[in-house]
Amino acid sequence: MRAGRFEALQPAADWQPLTTTDWPELLLVVLDGELGLHCPYTGRHSLDVGSLVALRCPSVMVRDLSGLDQAPARIAYGGIEALLPDGNPWITDDGALMRTSIAESDLLRTVQGELLQESGSPAPGSGVVVDCIAKRMFTTLMRQQVTLPQLSAKARRLSRVLDALRADLSRQRTLDELADLAGMSRTAFHQAFCEAYGESPLGCLTRLRMERAQTLLKGTDQAIKAIGLGLGYKSRSSFWSAFKAATGQDPTSFRAQSRTPLQPG
């Protein structure tokens, strides 16, 4: 999922348009007060503090519905392009709206602080931070809307291994260790993991490490050697070789290219 810059707005008492230029969907959270939201397709909605909304709808209008005993309405909003893992849009109906509440969640504080701060920051990696927070917001919405099927016992075992890999990318793993974690024989575990995820367990670990490495190279000034050590590589050269084998670029070139401003065509 990609996200644009998020902005804070204090709507007026009269209806006013809310636009996110060049983005197909809108992600909005009510920070204070009570908000009125109108879309030609989904109608009018009243949103309380902490309401989180994802919406695909042109000509969105908002207004302050706060009473005298309430703080004025204040929102944070931004454009997103949310795709499901298979590359399809999260929903295809025009005007589709999903909503939940994050009023009791630390996510609301994250939006008020870090999301808005990073959206207005020129610091390297600010866009990565915005994307991550927006993904967390959208994931929260999806969890409220989608009922997942019950996992089989085997699927739960494999999921436990995947969670362990993600939780500690620096740890050196062996196939025997992971099979023990899944409570399966080495051969059965390797076959089941490959069938479920389309890659080997250790191949999956390498991919997760490389994805994390790319994020750190793009969004931080951390030394390449330190990134490699933090991902379980014993030397700068071993990390360098693994990164180039996975991406086709060495870490230095990747970092330089990711930070080179695009020239106008």
Image (tube, helix red, strand yellow):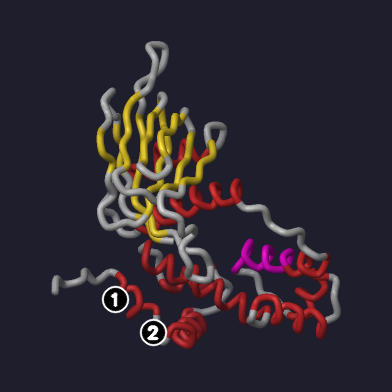
Q: Residues within 10 Å of mark 1 (few under 14, many from 20)?
A: few
Question: Looking at the picture, does residue 6 appear above or below residue 112?
Answer: below
Q: Amino acid at mark 2?
A: Gln
Residue 150 in percent (x, y) is at 76, 59
Point out the image quarter for the C terminus. Answer: bottom left
Q: Is residue 61 magenta?
A: no
Is 112 situated left or right of 50 in this image? left
Instruction: Give the quadrant of residue 161.
Output: bottom right
Residue 9 in percent (x, y) is at 29, 34
Which residue lies most toward the left here?
265
Q: Earlier in the sequence, mark 2 or mark 1?
A: 2
Q: Main secondary structure of the magenta part?
A: helix
Label 2 and label 1: CA atoms lie apart by: 10 Å
Return the residue at label 1: 257
Question: Looking at the picture, does residue 110 appear above or below residue 49?
Answer: below
Point out the image quarter for the N terminus. Answer: bottom left
Q: Amino acid at mark 1?
A: Gln
Residue 221 in percent (x, y) is at 36, 63
Return the residue at label 2: 249
- Number of disc labels: 2
Residue range of the region highlighted in magenta in the rendering: 159-169
Question: Is 69 or 37 nearer to us in this picture?
Answer: 37
Q: Residue at image x 60%, y 46%?
A: 144
Question: Looking at the picture, does residue 24 appear above or below residue 210?
Answer: above
For the residues bearing labels 2 and 1, Cβ distance under 8 angstroms: yes
Question: Is 67 or 114 nearer to us in this picture?
Answer: 67
